[in-house]
Image (cartoon, rainbow, N blue to C red):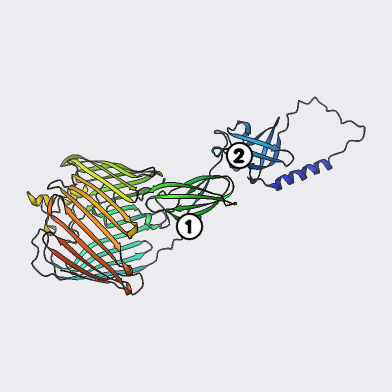
Amino acid sequence: MRRHYLKQLARSIALTFAILFAPATPAGAQAPAPAFAAEPATPAVVHLQLEVSINGTSTGMIGDFVDLGDGHFGCAAKELRELGLKPPAGEKPNDIVPLDQIANLAYVFDEQTQAISLITTDRNRITRRYDARGKREALKLRPSDYGAVFNYDVYAATGGGAASAGYGSRAFSGINASLDARLMAPMGVLDQTAIVGMTLADQTDLLRLNTTYTFANDRQLITYRGGDFISGGVGWSRPVRLGGAQVQRTFSMRPDLVTTPMPAVSGSAAVPSTVDVFVNGTKSYSQDVAAGPFQINNIPSISGSGVAQVVTRDASGKEDVQSLSFYTSPHLLRPGLYDFSAEAGLPRKSFGIESFDYDNTIVASASLRTGITDWLTAEAHGEGGGGLVNGGVGAVASISNLGVVSAAVSASSSDQGTGVQLYGSFDTKIGLVSVHVRSQHAFADYDDLATLTARKDTGRFGSQTEFLPGSVNNILSFAPPRAIDALTLSMPIAFDKSSISATYLRYQPQTGATSEILSATYSRPLIYDASMFATGYADLNDTESMGVYVGVSVPLDGNISVSTGLNARADKISGSADVSKPVTQETGSFGWRVHDHE
């Protein structure tokens, strides 16, 4: 406990009373001799309550020190900690630590003022930590209530000209209404989605999409689902639609929870000072700090790379400025956090075409992500069913302030054989240029649940046919691709308030020709909040597969926007126009969109 001047005053008063009221010995009389020979008395431990200063700056505290004799002093280990000093390793809280045994520490005792001045380095001082998020009130959760919601979206289209003769495509003309009905209660939410009207397959009165019961435990941040859902996964796995049960971590239930490790800055103040933190030139935090080393955690920042400037300013106005580079990524988890998903059920087939079409094979999958340190997050994923077993492990790591690298390896065993998949990605920023590199390769007979469930769902509009030979089999190959290699570069153009990005993608399916696609996009704001963009693309292995798309978007009053676009390819030119008004959260709001393509 910190001792103040009142403790020293109380001790002095008690000593004065002891002297004044002690029994007096008559003049000339001698104290009575003891009835027995006493052993030599052990010297009493002398405690001194001393005002403490460190490196010439008063701490504003009174410390309990022990006079060891011959001008040497000691202090209890727990007392040193309260004064902001690190005791030697292994010392128990009540152990008296001689100050002379602490490396890089000197002291001066002033008997007249009952003060002690300690001189040491930051290595011996305890770092004071501050949280840039400050003290935040606990999120107040409202109890669930009963209610009902009904959402609807009406879509109508008409097409002119010859119908496309491609596989799985035909002209469509009709009207649809997509429906979303929900019943809410304290025990969960029942959600039903459907389409009423005409579909691409044929005319039908009602097409069921998803029927899902959801219960959210907002204290444990866990969501339980029963019915139709999409399985969880990691960046190197492929999710599937299932009908069954799922349990999943849902951080979005706590919007105040920061799951990503945030940057931290540290420094040292010779005297009490004010520290201002600037992130990419914008002031994001200010904190008064005591003398000594300090660390400010959870600095607010944007995802990606940045530079934090720490400005330390004392009472005289003297400033000390240091710059620190950092790189943050939403793919990293704070230490101690777990993100998981586990599900089991029957694979959903012909979704959007058939209302009730499930495979009779039970499958299951599970994914786990956990933060190990601020710079390392571990991943794991497994799935199986129908003779398939697939499992893998991966990691996401921050490489100093250079970027974030991800790597994973997974293996599978199925009726088709065994195989391995390797995955890697790297995100960084070089100057103003953001760089994303990704590579994924499958070897031998690598398989996953997405392949297993799709093999029985390759017929046109839900007819269950096996793989067809020849070119049709190539089109319908749902197996993991043999290779995906991608490189994306993007950067803002500061002097023009515009941005540009370029992507190279190499895609090699399990069967069929390899595609190498190169694309570039340019976007720029215009006057009156309008904007324009232009995109060019080309398949390097097919000279006729190239084109350019140019568009302009203009916002109008009443939350209405107009956009137009022109698409030029090697064989034809087409244009489109849209006028839309989105739905807002206000009661009675409605939205609409009109689209024309020529």
Depicted 158 relative to depicted 514: above or below: below
Depth check, front residue: 263 or 322: 322
Please, what secondary structure does the residue beneath circle 2 have?
helix
On the image, the x and y values in percent for residue 452 come to 18, 48
Residue in the picture at 26% in, 58% down: 522
Q: Identify the image quadrant of residue 83.
A: top right
Residue 200 can be seen, yes or no: no
On the image, the x and y values in percent for residue 257 come to 42, 54
Q: How crowded is mark 2: few (under 14 residues within 10 Å), some or many (20 or more)?
A: many
Depicted 536 relative to depicted 43: above or below: below
On the image, the x and y values in percent for residue 167 come to 10, 58
- The disc placed on residue 81 is none
Q: How crowded is mark 1: few (under 14 residues within 10 Å), some or many (20 or more)?
A: few
The residue beneath circle 2 is 80
Q: What residue type is labelled 2?
A: Leu
Please, what secondary structure does the residue beneath circle 1 have?
loop
